[in-house]
Image (cartoon, rainbow, N blue to C red):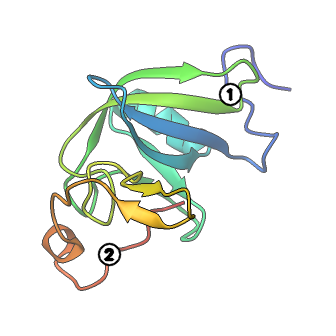
Amino acid sequence: MTSPDQPDFAKSGGLITAVTVDAATSEVLMVAFMNADAYARTLSTGLVHYWSRSRGKLWCKGETSGNVQRLVELRVDCDADAVVVRVDQTGPSCHEGFRSCFYRTVTPEGRFEVDAERLASPEEIYGTASAPDAGA
C-alpha cells in the first residue's frame, strides 16, 4: 500500500511517468520515468534523477553532458502515478541537442517537421558521434 505522501510506484512495475517542464516558461522539455530511488534522490539533492528503462539504471540528468536539471517544484497527479517536474534547465534537455525533446510538429499529412533550433550537436554535447540513449 502506498503512503498518502508517496507516489504509487506499484501500478506500473515500479515506475512513474515524469513530465519535465521549464519552470519559467512551462515548455514541456521531456518525458521520462522515475523509480522510488530516482524520486528520493531528486528530492534529496535538488538535481533531477530518472530511471533508464533501456539501460536499466538510475541516472542524473546532465551527468554526461553537463546539461543538468535543477528541481524547482515537483507535482503529483490525482492517482499518484505521474509527476510534473518543474526545473531550471541548463543547456539542451534533449540528447539530440534541442532545448526540448518535442522539437518536431506532425503535419496534417503525418510527416514530422523540425520547428526548433538545435542548440548543440550530439558530438558537441557528448564528444562522440552518437549520443547515449535518452533514458526512456
Residue 43 at x, y percent in the picture: 44, 28
Question: What residue do we see at 29% from left, 25% from top?
Answer: 25
Answer left or right for 94 relative to 77: left
Q: Label 2, on which residue?
A: 131
> What's the residue type where badge 2 is placed?
Ala
- Considering the numbered disc 1 on the image, is that residue within a helix, a strand or a loop? loop
Residue 38: give x, y in percent of width and height.
51, 43
CA–CA distance between discs 2 and 1? 31 Å
Q: In which quarter of the image is residue 85?
A: top left
Residue at the image position 73 percent from the left and 38 percent from the top: 9
Circle 1: residue type: Pro
Quadrant of image for the C terminus:
bottom right
Mark 1 closeness class: few <14, some 14–19, many ≥20 residues within 10 Å: many
Horizontal arrangement in the rendering, residue 63 relative to residue 84 (left or right): left
Question: x, y (%) of residue 106?
Answer: 50, 57
Q: Which mark is residue 7?
A: 1
**Residue 112: horizontal and vertical position, in percent?**
46, 65
Residue ranking furthest to the top? 4
Residue located at (58% from left, 70% from top):
54
The foreground one among 82 and 109 is: 109
Mark sitting earlier along the chain (2/1):
1
Residue 129 vertical position relative to residue 13 in the rendered view, above or below:
below
